[in-house]
Image (spheres, coloured by chain):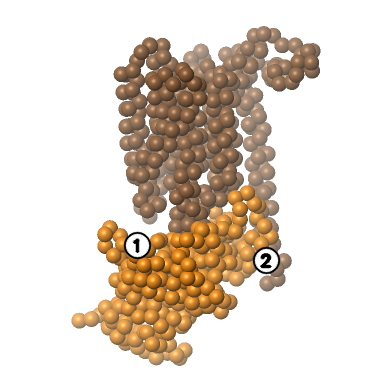
Amino acid sequence: MSDAAVSNPLADLSSRSRLRLSIFYGFLLPIVFLSLLAGVGIGSTNISWSTILRVAEFKIFPQAWTSSVHITKADEVIVWLIRVPRVIVAFFVGAGLAAAGVLLQALFRNPLAEPGLVGAGEGAVLGGVISFVTGWSATSVLSLPLMAMAGALLALFIVYAMSTRGGVTPVATLLLAGIATSALLSAVASLLLSVNIVNWQIAQEIVFWMMGGLDARTWTHVWLCAPFVLLGIAASLIQTRDLDLLQLGEETAASFGVDVESSKRMLTLTAAILTGAAVAVAGLIGFVGLLVPHAVRMILGPSNRRLLPASALTGGAFLVLCDLLARTIHPPTEIRLGIVTALCGGPLFIYLLLRQYRGVAN
Amino acid sequence: MSVLEARNASVKRGGRTIFGPASVRIGAGEITALIGPNGSGKSTLLRLLAGLWRPDGGEMLLDGKAIHGFARKEMARRVAFVPQETQIDFAFTVGEILAMGRYAHRGRFSPQSEADRAAINSAATYCDITHLIDRAINTLSGGERQRVLIARSLVVVPEFILLDEPTANLDIHHALDVLQLCESLSRKGKTVVVATHDFNLVTRYVTRLILLREGLLIAEGPQAEVLGPKTIQEVFHVEAEAIPTKNGHPVYVFHQRT
């Protein structure tokens, strides 16, 4: 066989997968844009997209350019102080949880791993509660996300140590370890809350936060979450080749030159940063990290270099839309965001679980 | 030319010595078979040689230097390991699987180079899997998967290739294909080590045998010197009868010992 004939199949492969990737992003990017626009525009007061763009113009560009732009004070407040921060927080929380899901699924070599199911979510909640009851959150706003990340990291170490033997994580053990650790950590969090209630108002705030949701998010929440999510995604992106090999098994990864132990530590830390950043501003929101990577993997395949950025963007748009649904489906009450994501993700989780067990049985 | 060596290497698990102490020398260009029943320490020795496990006693050497002193990537570039388990549950394409084999040659931020592509192409051609390149690995047959995993180890362009039971899950036709591939690799100057319990199958293809039983080295050398009814009985606990064949290597049939 000549060299040219040999190189052709490979060239075809890369051009075909590039085409598939372009089509995927050709759909995804408009969806992301429209979901952000809809998230800002639709609500108890509907705001036209032209008003949204005018407000954005007014806020983003220097005043000299925008002196002719005409907007009302009410529109400005609703768009810029209420809707926009909420939508941006939703986007980054969704992106962070989806990226954390991708990392955890490769790390545990299991499609069912997800921040909420492997204890990381409850760990982050416990970290957040500690930062509330100790008063650190009043001293420094940064203490909430940092403590949430530390909690998520602790939980991941416990669950990993409990469920993984010789690089293998059986599904049942993973889920049981996740449930047990979650229950323990959330009991500790509740205990801390009940013995430390100094102020009824603070307690209410904490309980509200623990339930998960995106109501009344402000620009502060954006700055607490977005930088860490971006950091976590950047850190994930430079580890995608380690992730691919780890997904094939630790021994295989080691034999091809991956420093397995340090790689796993870095990945765990990254997943904890992403989970902690998301939980710190939105509480515990389940199933995003399960649903989104799974859907994207069905379209783009398992290669983490393609899966990670695509999942992060999809997760962001998904959570913005879920939040939109949660606050508009039954006005004037808002449904908890976690209910919407659970209704979408729960059936998929059950399907995956059944399929894995059938696979094992065969 | 490089040499892989075990010097009084031993492995302990749960306080019990499961392997060794044993000394083995794998010289360049040879094709060696590690032969023994299940649990005889073939896989353990293979993992020691690949630097995947560290010995609890004695030492493992590559060109006279301790293996664990080499960086993980350096070791991976020189010694390739083909695992027994070929099942992969994720739908990576064969092309993606082969590209992963270049991990140790690429920096974290460097894109795929011309050398990477050339190594992938020639490995795929050599193992005759170019037509499978965009198939998902989990849709291939056992024989195809084994060829893909051998190709992935060639993508590394290693000096040593260590294969753990490469024929265990294959029918006879594909098993012989894989062994022929191993033989041709050794003729191309690669040093090949095959762990297997099926010595009838491999004797035609290998130049040297290492016989193991219960973690200990029983015999080593050219097969004419090492393999015979007596050593087979000692290692496998069966009575063996040599039957001459036209290619010069006897095959053995077995009788349960009474």
Letter of the brown chain: A
Letter of the orange chain: B
Give the residue number, with chain letter if any, for mark 1. B56
Foreground: A230 or B138?
A: A230
The numbered dot on residue B103 is none
The amino acid on which the numbered mark 2 sits, given as a three-letter code, is: Val
User: What is the x, y in percent for residue A107?
Assistant: 46, 46
Q: The residue marked by circle 1 belongs to what chain?
A: B
User: What is the x, y in percent for residue A62?
Assistant: 75, 19
Q: Quadrant of residue B119?
A: bottom right
| SS under mark 1 | loop
Q: Image point 44% across, 78% down: which residue?
A: B202
- Of circles 1 and 2, the one toward us is 1
The numbered dot on residue A6 is 2
The amino acid on which the numbered mark 1 sits, given as a three-letter code, is: Asp
Q: The residue marked by circle 2 belongs to what chain?
A: A
Q: Quadrant of residue A120?
A: top left
Foreground: B204 or B219?
A: B219
Is disc 2 surrounded by few (<14), some (14 to 19) or many (20+) residues within 10 Å? Answer: some
Tell me the CA gap for discs 1 and 2. 46 Å
| SS under mark 2 | helix
Residue A57 in view:
yes
Q: Image point 36% across, 67% down: which residue?
A: B58
